[in-house]
Image (cartoon, helix red, strand yellow):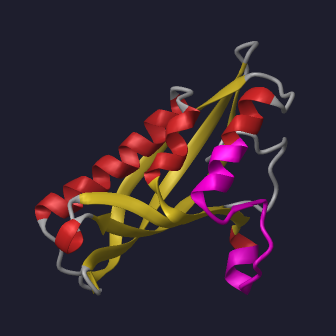
Amino acid sequence: MRAPAITAERRGAIERLMVDYVHAIDEGEYERWPDFFTEDGRYQVTGRDNFARGWVAGMLLCDNRDMMVDRIYSLRQVNVWEPHTYRHVIGPTQVLEAGMDGSAFTARTQTNYLCVRTMHDGEQKLFSTGRYLDDIVFEGPAGGDVPKLRSRMVIADSNQIDTLLVIPL
């Protein structure tokens, strides 16, 4: 399969988006997380089997940026959870589709991830592996140069998470 035509600048911008996303989460900068999405952005976490069957049900769903902001507020102010951090390792991003959608440049991509969880006592454990399936739109005039996630589907290799999913993947 041949990769869709995409400029080096846009490919670089997509790669920076992927790296900046995981670094914000890994460094505990959770308030930055919603800013990676468009206003109507969608974030969903589901398992590989559910995704393969076309089942909508998943582990987590935020239908827009405001829901993501609320989730982070809840994480910081309301929820009680055992302190822990993540460290992501991501693979190269594969561009599946790319082109103009009206006046905006869009791309559909997938990126493999591995996420290690470190608990407050130092215990480290492989928390989740899977892939991000993303719809990206470049915002701004004439397709712009700022990529944002219109949709991020986190497809975990397992349908089970061993603890509450507090921090975004």
Q: Residue at the spot x=45%, y=62% of the render?
A: 149
Question: Looking at the image, which is closer to me, 137 or 140?
Answer: 140
Residue occupying the point 56% across, 35% down: 31
At x 53%, y 43%, the residue is: 33
> Horizontal placement of 131 versus 74: left or right?
left
* Residue 55 on image: x %, y %: 77, 81
| Left or right position of 101 against 30 | left
Please indicate whether residue 165 sits to the left or right of residue 94 in the image.
Answer: right
Extreme-left residue of the structure: 8
| Residue 57 visible here | yes
Q: Position of residue 128 (x, y in %)?
A: 66, 48
Q: Is residue 27 above or below residue 72?
A: above
Where 80 falls versus 95 (above or below)? above
Return the x and y of residue 106 as percentages of the image width and height: 32, 75
Indicate whether 123 appears above or below 98: above
Find the magenta span and give its range.
50-71
**Which image quarter is the N terminus in?**
bottom left
Q: Does residue 153 appear anywhere in the picture?
A: no
Q: Is residue 87 magenta?
A: no
Residue drawn at the location 38% of the way across and 41% of the way down: 20
Number of marks present in the image shown: 0
Residue 16: image x %, image y %?
29, 47
Q: Quadrant of residue 6?
A: bottom left
